[in-house]
Image (cartoon, rainbow, N blue to C red):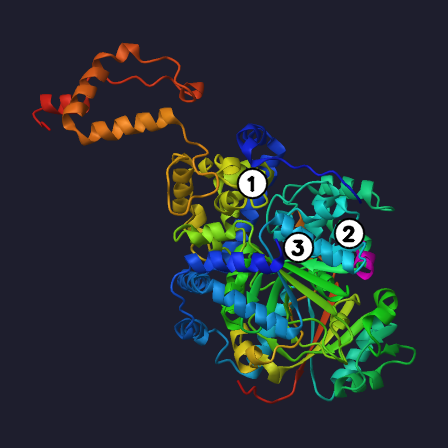
């Protein structure tokens, strides 16, 4: 049976049995909004959200660094040096990428994602120690980074290198996932890939024993930059 | 790993496997530990009973809204995907799904497929189909990888290698992964698994994944995982194929928020998993990674049968969290493999009859005390016990009886003798004179009660009617009928 005929058969079978369609979902959305309206962090200050973000992320073995706009590059550069990072993947076209690159110790090499993945897949997999990304925002309640990869910082930067370093501004922290989706208008502008990251890669597939570093980055550092601006939503 | 033989057992042999499983002390111990662990993890995620009940109501309402509008939502989902450049395929059954995926692989000249976790691909036995045609499918979820190396099937839908001890996995890795010495250290084992799979992601021609939720409005696939293998499978290879049941689609992206929370909290007791991977189409112009070609295969495989019946449609509300199996006293005692179906436990008992027919699965629907623990924890309130009773009814219905939407395998457990007994019984109960006569006869002829009474006397003393009936005794006391 061709896929087209199969399509008609499946849709026909469903239509024959479906109740009268009731596509209006406004009541449902009102209930969803109502359920989240009183979330624990909805009324929290930026500092409170950042504190919760730090606590939740730390509880799943993420290393959180609190800093401010002026001092984070130097702080992070020292840490990267101490960790023995030699090749760091970042986007020098962003202000943050440029600031970090300028602060790095002599001898640490920066790489930028300047060609398609297939052109340098093997070296990305074997020769990059860390990837640096700037999160679009964060979600305090679950300790989550919202990453929207783009041409400068593609998807694999936060995925393939064993160490992922992410920077998130405290002013972008949302109370919860519902708030993030609504205030950023996800439904009207989804990028190819939106990734929510809540800790380093892990698994409990062997006798329910938690182990970190399954397939994604085994180590996650998050720099929360206190930028002193209250979030808009 | 070509043409590897796999162990296929039939759900029809369920009864035979049960006693073996019950006597397997190692399995009993490890299942008990695992179930306790998962139950505790879940309950700590729901400290507020009111919030939980409210969220379950919401989850049920969202899934029911999606099912009520399913045909329209599928059409909308399809056009959202096509607008993004995704190729959409429809498959009636396992063979069609496998053929579609094989055709894509052939056209691309693919030799290897790396797989993120996908129960739908287990359902269609994709690995087996592909290996017979010279295409290597590698499971990359750690649990799936372990059961693939062991030439087994998953015993749990969320924790595929739940039944395996670390010692067994240590021995398995030592045998199959070059340069891996035996160890029971879990960190070392996971590292060995990571190393051996790393190159597979880079080399694979195609990445295949399942889908946890799909949004009709944006065409987004929402994938939930902890390991990162799902992200790698859907990002690194040049082609991504997502295989999903037709019931997975919901109307709007925002409807997924409560469902995702219910899923992770119910399944593994996590407020959120490490990764929520939201995929909206293939690589766009200017982007430097991600698949350039993307396919979504929409699978029926018996789901339209469940959909056709208003009561059984609730089966399709399932979000595959596995909480029902984690709380099932039967699943805990016999383990996942005993069922012989892709989906074991309570959800397996109510979905498998539609996938495989009642001929194969009639015994499964009886393997429940109807204790109701599954329905109590189900995040989308599927009334599993009443669906089991309904499926038992259909399995015992006269195969010749004409009904509106007959289930595949209707009457698989039907027996004329049993029907005769029930007919007599209901007839006698409806006519007091017949009942009185039967009562008189039974109490007088009690000496003739057979000493062997089919299955009953295998473990119990025979049933013998009492000397006097209850109403006789009451009449003597002056408390007459």
**Closer to the N terminus: mark 3 or mark 2?**
3
Q: Which residues are magenta?
A: B197-203
SS at mark 2? helix
Q: Could you tell whether A16 is left or right of A58 in the image?
A: left
The image position of residue A50, as x and y in percent, is 60, 78
- How far apart are labels 1 and 3 at the CA level? 25 Å
Q: Which of the two residues, B161 or B299, is positioned nearer the viewer here?
A: B299
The image position of residue B430, as x and y in percent, is 19, 31
Q: Nearer the viewer, mark 2 or mark 1?
A: 2
Q: Which quadrant holds the C terminus of chain B?
A: top left
**Closer to the N terminus: mark 2 or mark 1?**
1
Q: Which quadrant holds the N terminus of chain B?
A: top right
SS at mark 3? loop
Q: Chain of mark 1?
A: B
Q: Residue at x 53, y 47 (%)?
A: B326
Q: Which of the two residues, B95 or B190, is positioned nearer the viewer here?
A: B95
- The residue where tag 3 is placed is B117
Q: Chain of mark 3?
A: B
Q: Chain of mark 2?
A: B
Badge 1: residue crowd in 10 Å (few <14, some 14–19, many ≥20): some
Badge 3: residue crowd in 10 Å (few <14, some 14–19, many ≥20): many
Same chain for the residues under marks 3 and 2 in the image: yes
**Closer to the N terminus: mark 1 or mark 3?**
1
Can you say whether A134 is above or below B298 in the image? below
Can you say whether A134 is above or below B1 in the image? below
Badge 2: residue crowd in 10 Å (few <14, some 14–19, many ≥20): many
Q: Could you tell whether A58 is left or right of B411 in the image?
A: right
Can you say whether B430 is above or below B50 in the image? above
Q: Mark on residue B32?
A: 1
- The residue where tag 2 is placed is B193
Q: Quadrant of residue B274?
A: bottom right
Q: Residue at x 75, y 74 (%)?
A: A165
């Amino acid at each position: 049976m061709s896929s087209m005929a199969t399509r008609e058969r499946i849709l026909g079978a469903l239509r024959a049995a479906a109740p009268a369609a009731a596509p209006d979902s406004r009541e449902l959305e009102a209930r969803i909004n109502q359920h989240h309206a009183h979330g624990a962090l909805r009324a929290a200050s930026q500092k409170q959200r950042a504190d919760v973000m730090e606590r939740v992320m730390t509880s799943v073995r993420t290393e959180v660094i609190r800093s401010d706009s002026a001092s984070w590059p130097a702080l992070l550069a020292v840490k990267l040096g101490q960790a023995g990072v030699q090749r760091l993947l970042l986007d020098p076209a962003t202000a943050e990428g440029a600031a970090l690159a300028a602060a790095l110790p002599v001898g640490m090499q920066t790489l930028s994602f300047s060609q398609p993945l297939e052109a340098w897949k093997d070296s990305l997999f074997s020769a990059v120690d860390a990837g640096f990304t700037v999160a679009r925002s964060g979600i305090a309640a679950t300790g989550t980074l919202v990453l929207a990869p783009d041409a400068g910082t593609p998807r694999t930067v936060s995925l393939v290198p064993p160490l992922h370093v992410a920077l998130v501004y405290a002013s972008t922290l949302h109370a919860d996932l519902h708030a993030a989706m609504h205030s950023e208008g996800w439904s009207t502008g989804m990028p190819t890939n939106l990734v929510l990251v809540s800790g380093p890669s892990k698994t409990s597939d062997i006798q329910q024993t938690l182990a970190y570093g399954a397939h994604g980055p085994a180590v996650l550092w998050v720099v929360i930059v206190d930028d002193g601006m209250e979030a808009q939503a | 790993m070509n043409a590897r033989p796999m162990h296929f057992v039939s759900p029809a042999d369920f009864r035979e496997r049960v006693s073996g499983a019950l006597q397997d002390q190692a399995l009993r111990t490890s299942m008990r530990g695992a179930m306790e662990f998962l139950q505790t993890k879940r309950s700590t995620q729901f400290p507020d009973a009111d919030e939980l009940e409210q969220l379950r109501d919401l989850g049920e309402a969202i899934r029911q809204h999606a099912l009520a509008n399913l045909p329209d939502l599928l059409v909308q989902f399809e056009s959202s995907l096509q607008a993004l450049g995704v190729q959409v395929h429809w498959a009636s059954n396992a063979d069609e799904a496998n053929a579609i995926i094989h055709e894509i692989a052939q056209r691309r000249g693919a030799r290897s497929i790396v797989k993120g976790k996908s129960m739908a691909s287990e359902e269609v036995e994709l690995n087996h189909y592909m290996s017979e045609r010279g295409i290597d499918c590698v499971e990359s979820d750690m649990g799936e990888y372990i059961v693939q190396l062991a030439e087994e099937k998953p015993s749990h839908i969320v924790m595929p290698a739940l039944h395996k001890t670390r010692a067994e996995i240590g021995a398995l890795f030592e045998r199959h992964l070059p340069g891996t010495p035996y160890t029971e250290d879990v960190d070392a084992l996971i590292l060995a698994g990571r190393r051996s799979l790393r190159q597979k992601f880079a080399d694979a021609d195609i990445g295949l994944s399942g889908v946890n939720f799909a949004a009709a409005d944006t065409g987004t696939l929402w994938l939930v995982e902890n390991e990162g293998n799902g992200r790698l499978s859907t990002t690194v290879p040049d082609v991504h194929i997502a295989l999903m049941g037709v019931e997975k689609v919901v109307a709007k992206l925002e409807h997924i928020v409560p469902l995702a929370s219910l899923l992770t909290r119910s399944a593994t007791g996590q407020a959120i998993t490490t990764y929520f991977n939201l995929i909206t189409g293939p690589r766009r112009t200017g982007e430097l990674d991600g698949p350039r070609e993307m396919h979504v295969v929409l699978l029926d495989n018996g789901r339209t049968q469940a959909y056709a019946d208003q009561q059984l449609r609730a089966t399709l509300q399932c979000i595959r969290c596995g909480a029902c199996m984690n709380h099932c006293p039967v699943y805990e005692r016999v383990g996942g493999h005993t069922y012989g179906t892709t989906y074991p436990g309570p959800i397996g008992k109510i979905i498998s009859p539609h996938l495989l027919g009642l001929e194969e699965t009639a015994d499964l629907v009886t393997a429940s005390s109807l204790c109701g623990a599954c329905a109590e924890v189900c995040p989308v309130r599927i009334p599993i016990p009443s669906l089991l009773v309904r499926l038992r009814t259909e399995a015992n219905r006269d195969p010749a009886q004409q009904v509106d939407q007959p289930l595949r395998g209707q009457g698989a457990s039907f027996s004329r003798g049993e029907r005769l007994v029930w007919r007599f019984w209901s007839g006698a109960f409806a006519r007091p004179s017949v009942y009185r006569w039967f009562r008189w006869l039974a109490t007088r002829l009690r000496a003739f009660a057979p000493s062997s009474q089919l299955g009953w006397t295998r473990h119990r003393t025979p049933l013998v009617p009492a000397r006097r009936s209850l109403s006789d005794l009451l009449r003597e006391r002056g408390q007459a009928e």
